[in-house]
Amino acid sequence: MELSDYLRVLRAHWAGIVLITLVGAILSFGWTFTQAKVYSANASGIVSLQSNGDIGSNAVGDSLSKSKATTYVQVGESRAVAQLVITQLGLATTPEALVSNVSVSNVKDTPTINVTAKASTAEGAKSLADAWINGLAAQIKSIEAQSLVAGSSAAGSTTGDGIFLVPVESAVVPSTPIFPNVRLTIGVGALIGLILGLAYAFVRNLLDRRIRTVEAVERQFGLSVIGTLPKDKRLDDEHRIVPEADSTDYATESGQYALAEALRELRTNLQFMNVDNPPRIIVVTSPLPNDGKSTVTANLAVTLAAAGQKVVVVDGDLRKPSVTTAFGLVPGVGITDLLIGKAEIQDVLQPWGNSGNLLILGAGSIPPNPSELLGSQGMSILLHELSRDAIVLVDAPPLLPVTDAAVLAARTDGAIVVISAGKTTVDELGKALTNIAKTNGKTLGVILNRVPTKGALGRGYGYYYGSYYGTDGDTKHATKRVSAEDTAAVVNNVVPIRTGTDSR
């Protein structure tokens, strides 16, 4: 992954990252209330030698005091001192337990001994520290007294003037506990939450099979993305046709310039796809329903016509035709009626717009076996005759539910596959492209549709065959159906296209 990929993941999942980070901080803050508070207080004393005052004795005494201070650190953490403190404070605990709450240390090369005591209350910590330094002083006094009585040890003879611990600094009542440290705990909790949030984002991105970027298509399939169209709520209308993208009024409307420019860019890419042998008959399809293929077909046709190009839009979805409805035309006779000889070509082509460059060929009557009809030689002849004077855009059914689009792709110059950003998965697109390849069809490119202009991409999508092609109770697309005998005649025999000058 490149830096841009990491940034894309962070932008897509920033809300989850922030939420998990906040949860970590809040949980850690709440955890501090479940913990017993611990306060700490410090007291100190100095090991001193009572001498006769001459210079030599002072030098020796200073050195001896430093040495003794180091030795008495161990005494300060003994059970004997703990027992003295228990007796003094009247504590209901054991010496071993009390020693674990106290630490005794010596400042290097000094006769100073520091005592740090911990307790569940601030006053308790202060009392324990003061009592401990006093108890240590008493214990040192007792040890030194025994040494003097013995009189046989070097320490006893050297310290005839007496060694003792002088408490010099009493403990202060602490204002805040040392545990739990609320700020530190919240910081650590937030950091852990941030790490978990980042892990969540990248794991989710790794498991997410939805296609979100142009790079994902090109990297995974090696196909060119010939256009990216932004999501526009105006395309959700029943007719799904935006105003002509080249018109000044449309291009200057707030928020609509991006779509207008995207359509013009798509038109340019299509026109320069193969300069020497440009495609004339193009199938527009998608992996699944509701990817916007019919809307893309209609608006691409309008954009091409606005540039002076003659275009014929053919409704190749004989199962659920929608092209005439998209253009606001009345459904009537169409492809099936033309192929079985029940209509003339001038009867089925409907003009749209003021330019005179755009013609619409509806589906006509719904046949019982659309795949065979679309793959017939008569259909091939029809498309090639239409392409003599115009670019033919065939709005075909989705590739995964049925084979119609793949059959059409094999008899045309190729197919453009429309996918929805953040909805179409890698597996769906891969299977769709495989279906085209199985019929020896050619994929001209991919259009990434409904690309969000801001925020995270859309949700996933589930497909069910019946939801798209179910006919029970479907009155919106109800049309008369062609008999099986008429369709069989088209499939088994070449039916020429009849114009007004044809003789019969």
Image (cartoon, grey):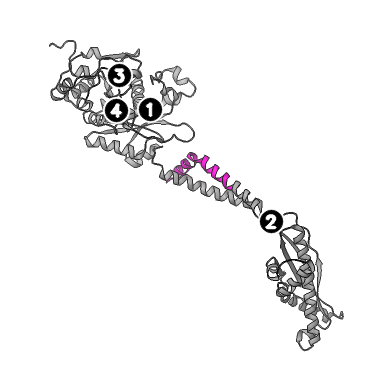
Q: Earlier in the sequence, mark 3 or mark 1?
A: 1
Residue located at (52% from left, 43% from top): 17
SS for callout 1: helix
Judge from the rendering whether residue 256 lies leftward or rightward of residue 322; answer left or right. Answer: right
Q: CA distance from mark 1 to mark 2?
A: 67 Å
Task: Determine the main secondary structure of the stretch shown in magenta.
Answer: helix
Which residue matches tag 3? Answer: 478
Mark 4 neighbour class, 10 Å CA radius: few under 14, some 14 to 19, many 20 or more:
many
Q: Earlier in the sequence, mark 2 or mark 4?
A: 2
Judge from the rendering whether residue 262 lies leftward or rightward of residue 501; answer left or right. Answer: right
Residue located at (35% from left, 15% from top): 328
SS for callout 3: loop
Picture mark count: 4
Which residue matches tag 2? Answer: 37
The amino acid sitting under disc 4 is: Pro
Q: CA distance from mark 3 to mark 1?
A: 36 Å
Judge from the rendering whether residue 238 lies leftward or rightward of residue 309; answer left or right. Answer: right
Q: CA distance from mark 1 to mark 4?
A: 25 Å
Percent x, y of residue 379? 20, 23
Which residue matches tag 1? Answer: 265
Q: Earlier in the sequence, mark 4 or mark 3?
A: 4
Question: Which of the two discs, 4 and 3, sits closer to the camera?
Answer: 3
SS for callout 2: loop
Residue 37: quadrant of the picture = bottom right
Mark 2 neighbour class, 10 Å CA radius: few under 14, some 14 to 19, many 20 or more:
some
Q: Are marks 2 and 4 in contact (CB under 8 Å)?
A: no
